[in-house]
């Protein structure tokens, strides 16, 4: 494990099988996505799932599409229909998530293939009952069940991972999820959760100051409450907080907070450099990696354990190079 990831165990990430090169698409091809196979692959373990192959549709197979139809109870719903014979595969595809539930609960994230009536997460075209007109958008049957069963799991569509900010956010959440899972899998003591929370202070603040305060209140009662209840409540609040999109302003606040911890130890020149780096990032002329690198350097040179241990400074392996674009 890359020590810069700050994570004691490799995250486990579910993935639409075709995205990591399995030839399971309807036409016998795959949709290999290089960021997953050439970069993220070095730092995570995969749980590949192809829902359509699992329900025995075979390769190659007729295409599927989402149609607005009545379900068994007569209510209108998005159904996954075969273009060849009109067969409805919705329930079988959703049940794949139920069958894998034990493994899915062990995951730290999931990457789904976009534009798939089984795996797609956002804005899939939904045809009318005659399959003639698109009259809305929906979600793939497997993706809908997955996100319903595990609402706090970091889940992203492969197409959106081309956006540097969305990619960075997803990867950050996956590694944070793995750190918390690893802690809660152990015989943790109250002080371990306090220490975990302290190390994540800046990272939580950079996403949700309210979430930071909420998780802090949960940790404050860890000594006198039921351990499992605290773990479940903390995990939910922690994941909810990190799911909030960060911003340049929230990052700048977190960086200023770190600056406040270390500035008494710096001379004027280094203080000025660090403040200038934070400001350059805040106004959009420098990447986040610049002030973060300065902070890391000063924390290590001055041996400032509190700030140096912050996961915010090392949220995932450096090799992923996710904080370098100026736009993030
Ligand atoms: S998008 Fe999903 S169902 Fe389609 S080939 Fe890929 S893994 Fe299988």
Image (cartoon, grey):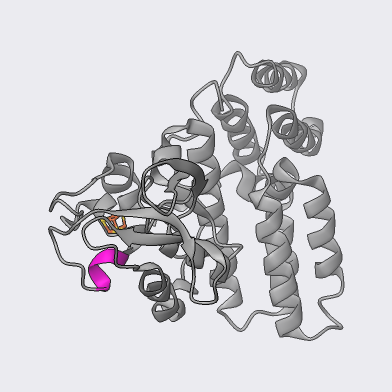
Which part of the image, by quadrant, shows the C terminus? top right
Residue 158: percent from left, percent from top? 39, 44
Q: Quadrant of ligand 1?
A: bottom left
Is residue 235 located in the magenta-colored stretch of the structure?
Answer: no
Q: Overall secondary structure of the magenta stretch?
A: helix
In the image, residue 99 above or below residue 276: below
Judge from the rendering whether residue 268 lies leftward or rightward of residue 122; answer left or right: right
| Residue 156, visible in the rendered structure | yes
Q: Of residues 280 and 92, which is closer to you in this image?
A: 92
Residue range of the region highlighted in magenta in the rendering: 51-55
Residue 49: percent from left, percent from top? 31, 65
Residue located at (72% from left, 16% from top): 269
Residue located at (87% from left, 83% from top): 224
| Residue 150, visible in the rendered structure | no
Q: Of residues 7 and 172, which is closer to you in this image?
A: 172
In the image, residue 148 above or below residue 271: below
Is residue 52 located in the magenta-colored stretch of the structure?
Answer: yes
Which part of the image, by quadrant, shows the N terminus? bottom left
Residue located at (68% from left, 46% from top): 244
Residue 280: percent from left, percent from top? 66, 16
Q: Of residues 19 and 189, which is closer to you in this image?
A: 19
Q: How many numbered callouts?
A: 0
Residue 111: percent from left, percent from top? 41, 53
In the image, residue 251 above or below residue 315: above
Residue located at (64% from left, 33% from top): 295
């Amino acid at each position: 494990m890359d020590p810069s990831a700050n994570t004691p165990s490799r995250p486990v990430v579910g993935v639409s099988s075709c995205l990591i090169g399995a030839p399971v698409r309807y036409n016998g091809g795959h949709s290999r996505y290089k960021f997953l196979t050439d970069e993220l692959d070095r730092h995570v373990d995969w749980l590949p799932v192809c829902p359509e192959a699992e329900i025995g549709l075979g390769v190659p197979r007729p295409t599927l599409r989402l149609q607005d139809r009545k379900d068994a109870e007569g209510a209108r719903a998005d159904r996954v229909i075969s273009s060849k014979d009109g067969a409805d595969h919705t329930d079988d595809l959703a049940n794949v998530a139920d069958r894998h539930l034990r493994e899915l609960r062990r995951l730290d994230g999931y990457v789904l293939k976009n534009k798939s009536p089984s795996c797609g997460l956002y804005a899939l075209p939904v045809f009318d009952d005659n399959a003639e007109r698109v009259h809305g958008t929906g979600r793939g049957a497997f993706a809908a069940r997955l996100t319903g069963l595990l609402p706090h799991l970091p889940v992203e569509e492969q197409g959106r991972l081309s956006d540097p900010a969305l990619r960075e956010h997803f990867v950050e959440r996956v590694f944070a999820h793995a750190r918390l899972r690893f802690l809660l899998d152990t015989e943790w003591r109250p002080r371990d959760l306090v220490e975990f929370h302290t190390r994540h202070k800046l990272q939580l603040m950079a996403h949700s100051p309210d979430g930071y305060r909420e998780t802090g209140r949960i940790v404050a009662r860890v000594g006198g409450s039921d351990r499992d209840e605290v773990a479940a409540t903390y995990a939910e609040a922690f994941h909810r907080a990190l799911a909030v999109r960060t911003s340049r302003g929230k990052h700048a606040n977190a960086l200023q907070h770190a600056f406040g911890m270390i500035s008494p130890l710096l001379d004027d020149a280094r203080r000025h450099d660090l403040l200038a780096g934070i400001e350059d990032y805040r106004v959009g002329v420098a990447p986040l990696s610049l002030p973060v690198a300065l902070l890391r350097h000063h924390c290590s040179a001055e041996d400032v354990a509190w700030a140096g241990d912050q996961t915010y400074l090392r949220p995932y392996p450096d090799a992923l190079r996710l904080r370098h674009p100026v736009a993030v």
